[in-house]
Image (cartoon, rainbow, N blue to C red):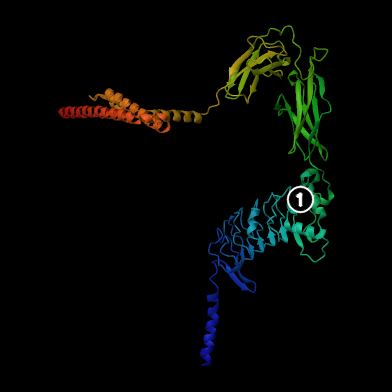
Amino acid sequence: MDTMIYLLVVMLIKAEPCRSYPRCLSGCSCIDDRHGRSLICMEESAFGAIPDNLPDDLTKIRIEKSHFTEIPRGAFSKTPAVENLWLNFNDITVINSKGLEGLGNLTELRLQGNKLRSVPWTAFEDTPNLKILDLKHNQLDVLPEHALKFLPGLTYLDLSFNQLTVISKEVFQNWPLYQKIQNAEERDVTASRTNVVLALHDNAWLCDCRLKGLVEFIASLSPPIILMNSYLTCSGPDFRAGKFFHEIELQACTKPVVSTPKANMSLPLGSNLTLHCYAKARPDPTVWWTYGLKIIRGFHESQERVSDDTIRSHLVIPSLSAADRGVYTCTAVNFIGNSSASVLLDVISADSASPSHVAGFPAASGVADQNVFIDIRIAKQTVRGISIEWFAALERPSETWFTIHFGQAGDDKKEMTYIGPGIHSYSISDLIPATKYEICVTLKSQMPRPGQCIVFVTGTDITEMEQREKLIHIVVIVLAMVLAVPIGMYVCTTDTRIPCYEVIVESWKRRQRESNSSGMEQERHGTFDSLQAASDEELVNKDFNEDRKVRRRSEDRLRKGRADQSRLTAELY
């Protein structure tokens, strides 16, 4: 008897695990401890995606090296008891904004070693109890100002080893936990508080004016907020690379201010020239040179840093020629604004004792050039623009300027544009469609003469799609008109013996009488003419009887015509 009882107890003990816990996933192991049941999947490429058949009693899930790329919507909605979720060393690039739906008990989320470039921070609305968030060794390069808004209980945040360059201090100032700590300090509360660990090291920090707020925030941190590594290092710009945050002092951002040592220069033909400009701005601006509204690419251009916020740009022009005469503009741009400065260059010919003209402006007209013929033509025309070309037989083409006069036809005052030597084409865009314009090309500063102007009209701004729509509208209107023609008109056009004309005339008379009678009936109820109602009704009845007779005669003729037609058809067959 004792033996039987012992065997029964052993069978009950062995049967208990099978009845309490479902089967574990293939390729994974399940562990039961005092914290609950854990699923551990560490095999290489065990899953191509997050499994749909996860056991619903899990409290910890650890899936690593499976190389799935996405956390889809509701991926863990069937495991509401999960408190620890480890998805390290996969290839996750996308997290659905509802990917953490149903994880209201989640306290730890680790996504180390994935390929995340951004995170849908609103997804953490579904994890109000989250305390640990590990995002190190990803590719995050942006951290929005409200990123931590939905993480009120977070005590550990690891953003190290990412690609963050610039973030605002408002990211942390909008963090509910930071605000709570600040309010406690203002009330001088000395009760014990949980430490908050923050890891921001080993990012590509760009230490310019845009990082000023974060540098000041890091310098002001004190317990209970603790930096895992307080030696944050700059990666750029080059003159600050390798420096620690506490070693630099950043200024507020400013728009560029460009200046040049000389605004006017005159040099002899064949000289070598280097133009300089200084661009002062925070952050560093982009600087380039232009000549005649075109970016200069043929000459050598270089830049060097003068101070933390000033760049000097050099433009080298070797062996000056007459064609190099003109206006050179240095432009600097950053995200706040732009600025420019110009240098007016004049090249002195070897056979002249003085400069030919003031640099940057057309020279005075010579006697030989007074009556030069200018052949002007339209090279290309669009709905909103035009391009022209011209040719002129000149004695000194390398030193002769042209003037473009442009405006609407009939306007006395036109816009003038000076064109330097060697240029024989000009383009204008952003014109008003279906408008008449006039454009003239003159020599130097002369006024337009007959034969030097072209009058043109810009095209209509109607696309092919709009033309099709208009054609469709016309077709619809024509069809509506055809359908609105009475059927009697079609009958009249056939070779039948039906007296259509009489039928239509009688029908028109009948409608006239009906409309007149209806109008009289309406007036009878609202005016003093209702006293004649009885006599009017008799007249109407009389007309009605006559109309019925006419209609009957018309119907007889119609039936007779149809019978004749059917007889004729029968004879043909």
Q: Which residue is mark 1?
A: 169
Farthest bottom residue in view: 1
Measured as percent of width and height from the top left, residue 291 is found at 73, 25
- Quarter the C terminus occupies: top left
Is residue 572 shown left or right of residue 203?
left
- The answer to which quarter of the image holds residue 323 is top right
Measured as percent of width and height from the top left, residue 26 is found at 54, 66
* Residue at 62% from the left image edge and 16% from the top image edge: 409
Farthest front residue in view: 531
Q: Is residue 369 above or below residue 433?
A: above
The one of 106 and 198 positioned closer to us in this rendering: 106
- The answer to which quarter of the image holds residue 448 is top right
How many labels were placed on the picture? 1
Amino acid, disc 1: Lys
* Residue at 15% from the left image edge and 28% from the top image edge: 571
Q: Is residue 203 above or below residue 76?
A: above
* Residue at 75% from the left image edge and 60% from the top image edge: 197
Q: Can I make out residue 493 in this image? A: no
Q: Residues within 10 Å of mark 1 (few under 14, many from 20)?
A: some
The one of 40 and 56 positioned closer to us in this rendering: 56
Is residue 447 shown left or right of residue 23?
right
Measured as percent of width and height from the top left, residue 116 is found at 64, 53
The one of 528 and 387 positioned closer to us in this rendering: 528
Farthest left residue in view: 571
